Amino acid sequence: MTAISRPSRSRPAVSTRWLTIGLFVLPALVLYAVFVILPVLQAMQYSLYKWNGLTPLTDFVGLQNYVTAFGNKAFQTSIGNNVLVVVLSLFIQIPFSLTLAVLLNRRFRGRAILRLLFFLPYVLSEAVTGIVFTLMLQPDSVLDTSLKTVGLEGLIQDWLGDSTLVMVTLFVIISWKYFGFHMIIMLAGLQGIPRELEEAALIDGADRRQSFRYVTLPLLGPTIRVSVFLSIIGALQLFDMVWVMTAGGPINASSTMAIAMFKAGFRSNQFGYGSALAVILFLCCLVVALLYQRFVLRRDTEGAITAYGG
Amino acid sequence: MSTRPRIAVLLAILAIVLAACGSGGGSAAPSAAAPSAAAPSAGGASEAPASAAAGGEPVTVDWWHITTGDPGKSDFQAAADAYMAEHPNVTIKTTVLENEAFKTKLSTTAAADYPDLFQSWGGGIMAQQADAGLLKDITADIADWKDTINAGAMSIYQYQGKQYGVPWDMGMIGFWYNKKLFEQAGITAPPATWDEYLDAVGKLRAAGIDPLAIAGKDKWPSMHLWTYLVLRNGGGDALSQMIESGDWNTDACKKAGEDVLALNALDPYQAGYKNADYNAEAASVGNGKAAMELMGQWAPSVQADQSADKKGLGDDLGWFPFPTVEGGAGAATDGVGGGNGIAVGVNAPPEAIDFLKYFSGTEVGNKLNTDGVGLSTVAGTEATVTDPNLQAVLAGRGDATFMQLYLDQATSGALSQAFNDATIALFLGQSSPEEVCQALTDAAAAG
């Protein structure tokens, strides 16, 4: 109990520390293994069988389910739609959120209320958002009557029924729901940037645009990179709102990978094929996440953020 | 010294964690043993009715159903209570589940834990359950009372000559129409042939009325329209042959597609039909905007529920059977329909089947009819259907020379989904008749 016993205890202390860590981590590890790792491995196993979920797993078909998936037009459309949402998110949604964040970072009356209003859509669940917008986009509903009232009836479209337009409509609604979230992340990032740096740049003769481009933006890099990451993963997993609004229709025009998977598994009981789609979706997310971590996020996680700031 | 108790605590935590895992594994063991326990009781089926009558061993019957709304929910419980009062040794444990939750729960239930009685629609999914050994063959058990049930409805719960369930509700799909709008368009009698039908659609459109409501998002309402066209063109035997062989590249299939294209050409559907769900479809008819929908016996109540005034069309609503197609092999009395039934799980005790017999009697049947829960399949309950429209459906069902179960329920797997996906593309003008027939043939081959 005293200073004397301390040296003698220093050796076992190292091993006890690992034991302690191990034992504390174990419950979480067990849960993770049982509810995440195991189901993923099971899905991989199922994906090699033709299976309706009821009979024993006997009909081994190798990689046939994967061949079917990539040859299936509806699934190709689904992948295309996921990629479309990723691209649109990166080039429209994120810059828009950034602009708003910069504007709302200035000091003016009503700033807090505006921040709150912009963040509000994010609080709604995807299902609720989907139902509300579906109602508003019905023919002769809120949107169409509003357009008529201001004399723009020429712009009225079959917003969710037109197969070329439906993804654009959905993207606008997804953006409406998530721009506030990305705006808040970037606002938080902006507030971490000391004002002195921008002031120094202004004193050194930079104009506002230059100070934003060469001081604010680089310092906001880590925040933007996280925002982009969340946006990509969210776009790849897109399901709830689309399912509620169009169920992937008309025909398969707004289908996504997750919707194709759900339909195969739970609508037509092709659990083998559905598992194959799930594995493809999983691998897409995994590869994107790993590559992003490795090549984009690493400079942030390695620390010394400002050193990379240029 | 102080490290020891710490390790002891950690080991205790570890022990708890392992114990938790252990009990998870442990609970699996008794349930795995259950099938062997169930086997003797199944073997003792022949002596069981005697023991039930004598008020023998306590027995629990597990019953899962999806009749979540009243009065149906109360009627079901009342039937269970009445049976239990007469058979004090039997406990009927009802589990009421919402439709989707029921499907999910059933698909994740192991054979040993399968309910004794549960909601079924017959057809393809029931066949899969039978193949997986989850259902009990009750052919012999119900032999003495099976003739009291509508034969067409019973056939839907047969698979490979064996009976696995009993229907308590069976209806038929037909056109529900708004008499007032038909009058406005100058249509004097419901169309009896497809040409007359197209003529009526043209007149309605000319009068500024949306002739027909469909649901592009839910897909199945228009799938039934296409099914009827195949049935009218090819006849019941040809349709059964297509389902059996999986070869949909037939004249009847292609002709049905062309008939749909002829309908499409008249711009017959309501505004926003491409992304309409079934409720929106029912609303457009119930609010008097669209003149017709092709739907089952539940249409009047859903129309009323979805309409702005919650009343629907009332006396303006009429029903007529699907028109015949000129030169087609199908008769006007061939129908497409379906309904609800109760399937019997593999572990069901004889008391479960005895209760099923009670549930399939005239007493419960009349109650379901008067409460509008379903169209009872029990002979002798026809008089309790008083609504003239439902009487028309009932007459159609009674006269049926051939009854095809809804195609997406009659089949399973990729094909079941393909009926909806392939035919909606036809109605939305994005597929040719040949492409639809080929897509179905491909899906049937994929299984």
Image: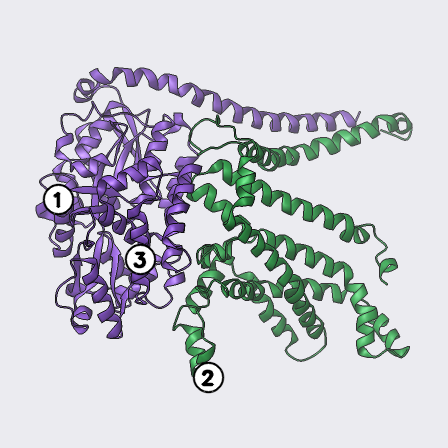
Chain colours: A green, B purple
Q: Nearer the viewer, mark 2 or mark 3?
A: 3
Q: Tag 2, which chain?
A: A
Using the numbered discs, state the Cα–Cα distance from disc 1 to disc 2 in whole angstroms.
56 Å
Q: Nearer the viewer, mark 1 or mark 3?
A: 3
Q: Residues within 10 Å of mark 1 (few under 14, many from 20)?
A: some
The C terminus of chain B appears in which quarter of the rendering? top left
- Any part of residue A32 in sight: yes
Most foreground residue, B6 or B198: B198
Q: Tag 3, which chain?
A: B
The N terminus of chain B appears in which quarter of the rendering? top right
Using the numbered discs, state the Cα–Cα distance from disc 1 to disc 3 in whole angstroms.
28 Å
| Location of residue B245 in the rendering, given as x and y in whole percent from the top left corner | 33, 35
- Left or right: B99 in relation to A273: left
Q: Amino acid at mark 1?
A: Gly
| Location of residue A240 in the rendering, given as x and y in whole percent from the top left corner | 50, 54
- Left or right: B101 in relation to A129: left
- Left or right: A270 in relation to A88: left
Which residue has dot 1 on it? B398
Q: Which of the numbered marks, if any, corresponds to residue A150? A: 2
Q: Secondary structure at mark 1?
A: helix
Most foreground residue, A152 or B227: B227
| Location of residue A11 in the rendering, given as x and y in whole percent from the top left corner | 87, 26
Which residue has dot 3 on it? B260
| Location of residue B9 in the rendering, given as x and y in whole percent from the top left corner | 69, 28
